[in-house]
Amino acid sequence: MQKDVVPRLQRIYAGVFGSGLGHITRILSIAQRIQNELGVELLYSTFDEALDLLESLHEHVVHSPSVGVKWNITGGFSGSDTLVRFPAYLFTFSRQTAFEAERISGFNPRVVLSDSRLSTLFAAKARLYPAVTILNQFKILFPPRFRRQRLSLFFERIESDVLGLLWSLSNEVLFPDLPPPYTLGEANVAGTDVAGKVKFTGFMSPKIKSMSLEEAVQIKRLLGFDSRPIVFMQISGPEPTKPPFIESAVKSAQLLSEEFNIVISKGVPFGSTMPSKLRNGVWVYDWCPIKDQLFLLSNMLVARAGHTTLSQCVENAKPAVVVPIYNHSEQLWNAEKFEKMGQGLAIRSEDLNPNRLAEYVRRCYSDPSYLENTEKLQSISKKYDGIGTTIEILKEFL
């Protein structure tokens, strides 16, 4: 009698950058689809906000050492503090790589998936596992105010060449964006040595499910919306970056409340899901359980300039006023391209105040060209399935 052959387990090890929720949300979208199709077992490795989210979802996750990026008291990226701590980052990176190598070997996956984690990629290649990398920032861009100096551009070019070479160790390098000239994150890949290896997959942002007319009516009734247009102010990002944005959002809402229905989500994980109503009729959530529905119902957004957020704006044809995190080079360049393509308006964090935010909301809503441009780019984005493309690539290793 012939013995049954026991198939090798289909496993994926996913190392995910943990600061903010943009990276983990797209990986969860990929995981959900591939698990539904193939029953693949996943082990996640991450830290910070992404770790909190995965633990709340009871996912199989290990706590990797945190990178520990520093944010200053104004809610921005602290370049000076980060530079001072650079030796500590090198030590943390070596700890991360050792941790990843041990966990990868113990889990014995068919393939390693790295979302913006160089330590995961190094560990995978050191232990001879194939690796697929998802990345929307291939180099460390200097903020625009520093790029006027030739020396800054010289150093940026050197580090981009080095990082490009390191990322290209991956078997596949996937860019979750549209191909040129529609690439939101074009500044983050242009001129790197890895550029020739990159596959533009289309966006990998979580798809927002359509809702029924009955559900839409229910939410409008719940929040007392009338015929005025709806503005959804969605605050996201690492916790230290939020207070200045929240303060400006709340104060600007008071200036706009007679013209718009306004809902603010502070994006506080595990915060209250019950909204509070301000005296001017504005609703404020700590954590909004109906954020997807409000995203669809809104006429326009106010949000950060993270890649996931902007891609969702494009995919759902929502004009937006975006406020990149102070000194956060990736978000600054994302916001610049978003505005350049006529998808909305951008305000630098150092220029943010309630009056300016209110003015930009009025401008963005009143100019029909922003909606027309978002609808055009939406039609282009529908030709791509970033999550589906990624799954097909992962299947080649399973």
Image (tube, rainbow, N blue to C red):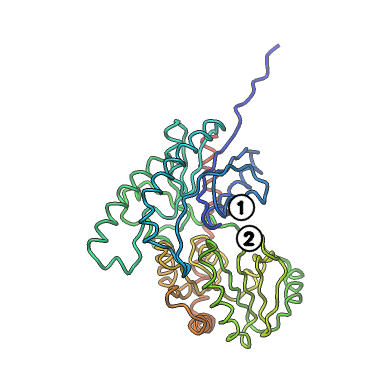
> What amino acid type should be assigned to the residue bearing mark 2?
Pro
| Residue at the outermost bottom position | 258
Please state the horizontal and vertical placement of residue 153, each as a whole percent of the image: 26, 60
Can residue 179 be seen?
yes
Q: Quadrant of residue 189?
A: bottom left
What's the residue at 32%, 52% (across, down)?
160
**Dot 2, crowdedness within 10 Å: few (<14), some or many (≥20)?**
some
Please state the horizontal and vertical placement of residue 59, each as a whole percent of the image: 65, 45
Horizontal side of 165 relative to 122 (left or right) equals left
Q: Which residue is mark 1?
A: 52
> What amino acid type should be assigned to the residue bearing mark 1?
Asp
What's the residue at 58%, 86% (across, down)?
255
| Residue at the outermost top position | 1
Can residue 183 be seen?
no
Q: Of residues 202 and 8, which is closer to you in this image?
A: 8
Q: Which residue is mark 2?
A: 269
Residue 214's place in the image compared with 98, above or below, is below
Whether residues under marks 2 and 1 lie with C-beta atoms below 8 angstroms apart, the answer is: yes
Residue 44's place in the image compared with 200, above or below, is above
Residue 76's place in the image compared with 396, above or below, is below
Please state the horizontal and vertical placement of residue 159, each as a whole percent of the image: 30, 52
Q: Of residues 240 and 307, which is closer to you in this image?
A: 240
Please state the horizontal and vertical placement of residue 30, each as a whole percent of the image: 58, 48
The alpha-carbon separation of the residues under discs 2 and 1 comes to: 8 Å
